[in-house]
Amino acid sequence: MRQCELLEVCRSSLYYQPKPVSDSDLVVMRCLDELHLKHPFLGSRRLAQMLLREGFKVGRRHVGSLMHRMGMEAIYRKKRTSIAAEGHKIYPYLLANVAIERPNQAWAIDLTYIPMAKGFAYLVAILDLDSRKALSFRVSNSMTTDFCLEALQEALARYGAPEIFNSDQGSQFTAEEFTKPLLAKGVRVSMDGKGRWIDNVFIERLWRSVKYEDIYLHAYETVSELRAAMGSYFSFYNTGRPHQSLEYRTPDEVYFATNIIKTAA
């Protein structure tokens, strides 16, 4: 009690334990994830109707709450996309009308919801937009800045720095601790602008590949098991999976064919 008084914290807040996600909600969230991949333009109203057709008794407000928990939103032209935290700096969008023609010219980062056998996690990845190479990834059970920063630091250490680094305006990416390493290396920070719903189309395609080619085929039990599986998948994605858009070359073949890697000493 005395500690609460000194910190000016309500005792009920200190003792509060968040309600765990129910098994029934986890099933709905898995279905929502699949529906969103197929129909990313649908909002909570239509998704709720589609879930009703699938036999789930859920309302629009509940679907909206689950989408918020999953970090999911409909993709369409609107005034704002992901909302930055108060006080975080928003950088201008730099990729408009820019032809991406070489590795390390532009990188993009995004995170996505990952369903598991019991529970869920979040996956963040950094993608080289020219070669489609997945430069780094991290798995976490919460949407915080720290695991995104770890992915960034690994990519910078292994592959040098890009000319432009693009993200949405999510609080994980607008935090000063995240943008500071980029600015220190002279990277031009870019953030999706108003109505720029198509900015992260390449990384959205990556999420589709990850989920349909791995996640939905398995039921990973733990975060550590999921992390190991993603390591194997991204290795296959980069080195063994031909991409039609790359004239059936792999991302590594495109990336290393024209790029000199700057590794950390």
Image: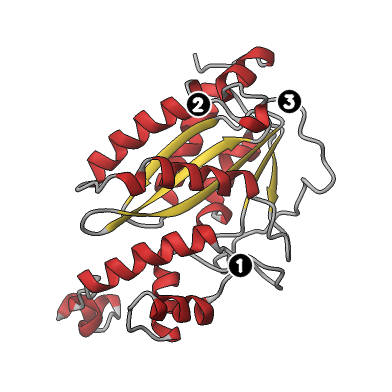
Q: What's the residue at 72%, 59% (across, down)?
A: 196
Q: Residues within 10 Å of mark 1 (few under 14, many from 20)?
A: some
Residue 1: x, y in percent? 14, 81
Q: Nearer the viewer, residue 96 or 63?
A: 63
- Tag 3: residue type? Arg
Q: Is residue 130 above or below residue 198?
A: above
Q: Which mark is residue 169?
A: none
Residue 175: x, y in percent? 54, 55
Q: What's the residue at 67%, 70% (across, down)?
A: 80
Q: Nearer the viewer, residue 224 or 17?
A: 224
- Tag 2: residue type? Arg
From the image, tell me which residue sits under label 2: 241
Q: Is residue 129 above or below residue 43?
A: above
From the image, tell me which residue sits under label 3: 102
Q: Choose top left, top right, bottom left or bottom right for residue 89.
A: bottom right
Label pair 3/1, CB-CB below 8 angstroms: no
Callout 3: helix, strand or loop?
Answer: loop
